[in-house]
Image (cartoon, rainbow, N blue to C red):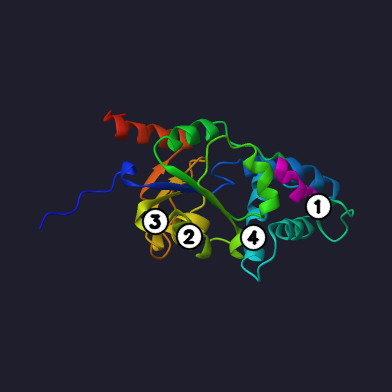
């Protein structure tokens, strides 16, 4: 029996994206607000420590009973800054999300990809917080699924189940594109989605998680993904 041909990028009918870290530069966003607050609180840290602590506390809080992402960010800020923080400090982190900016390649790449596929976003965020981000994205989106809508945070499955329902497609017809292997690549792969890891920081591939930790494709940027898609559609080799 002849083995089936490998999937191509162009074989998918829709692309779904994580937002913060994939489309939006969340690390610069949190560093801009937390770096001076930590210094004021007498807890200065190196940038990589701030990012690691933020990610660890966020993951732990999201794993508990559902609460809004604004509340998640408040709790992260309180833990990182300590009990002696001034009253408005905990609000500074969620309020800053409106100022988190897209990566330079995000909008050009999404606009190119939107000519080939339906695009969707599945994000661990509230509707209200996402509204400021949506205003910065120029490509058309078929749907946006937030944690507020599904009352769950990735790596839980509700975001991905809702993607299939809203797009009217099987998981195998959707290519999920994300920076986080833990939140996105592993659960999407386990559920049968195609997966693309956007490895913007040049991380070494980590040990694969259970049932789908290895991405099907890896690119250093969204621009590189869009280049590969265009090459497949035009028959060019790059």
Q: Which residue is mark 3?
A: 169
Question: Element at badge 1?
Answer: helix
Instruction: Point out residue 158 in the picture as x, y percentages from the top left corner.
Output: 52, 64
Question: Element at badge 2?
Answer: helix
Which corner quadrant holds the N terminus?
bottom left
Q: Which residue is mark 2?
A: 160
How far is the residue under mark 4 from the one under mark 3? 22 Å
Q: Which residue is mark 4?
A: 148
Whichever of callouts 3 and 1 sits on the residue coming sooner in the sequence is 1
Question: Element at badge 3?
Answer: loop
Seen in the picture, residue 197 relative to 231 is either above or below; the reply is: below
Instruction: Point out residue 67 in the picture as x, y percentages from the top left corner.
Output: 69, 65
How far is the residue under mark 3 from the one under mark 2? 11 Å
Residue 72 located left or right of residue 221: right
CB under 8 Å between discs 3 and 1:
no
Q: Crowding near pointer 1: few (<14 within 10 Å), some, many (20+)?
A: some
């Amino acid at each position: 029996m002849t083995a089936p041909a490998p999937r191509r990028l162009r074989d998918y009918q829709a692309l779904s994206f994580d937002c913060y870290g994939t489309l939006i530069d969340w690390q610069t966003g949190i560093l801009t607000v937390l770096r001076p607050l930590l210094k004021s609180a007498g807890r200065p840290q190196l940038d990589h420590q701030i990012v690691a602590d933020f990610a660890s506390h966020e993951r732990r809080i999201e794993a508990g009973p559902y609460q809004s992402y604004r509340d998640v960010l408040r709790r992260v800020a309180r833990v990182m800054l300590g009990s002696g923080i001034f009253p408005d400090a905990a609000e500074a982190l969620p309020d800053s999300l409106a100022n988190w900016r897209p990566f330079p390649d995000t909008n050009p790449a999404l606009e190119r990809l939107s000519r080939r596929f339906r695009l969707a976003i599945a994000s661990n965020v509230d509707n209200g917080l996402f509204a400021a981000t949506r205003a910065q994205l120029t490509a058309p989106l078929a749907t946006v699924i937030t944690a507020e809508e599904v009352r769950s945070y990735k790596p839980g499955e509700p975001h991905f189940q809702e993607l299939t329902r809203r797009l009217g497609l099987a998981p195998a017809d959707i290519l999920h594109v994300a920076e986080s292997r833990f939140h996105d690549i592993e659960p999407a792969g386990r559920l049968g989605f195609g997966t693309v890891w956007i490895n913007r920081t040049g991380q070494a591939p980590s040990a694969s998680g259970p049932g789908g930790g290895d991405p099907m494709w890896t690119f250093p940027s969204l621009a590189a993904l869009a280049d590969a898609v265009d090459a497949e559609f035009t028959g060019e080799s790059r």
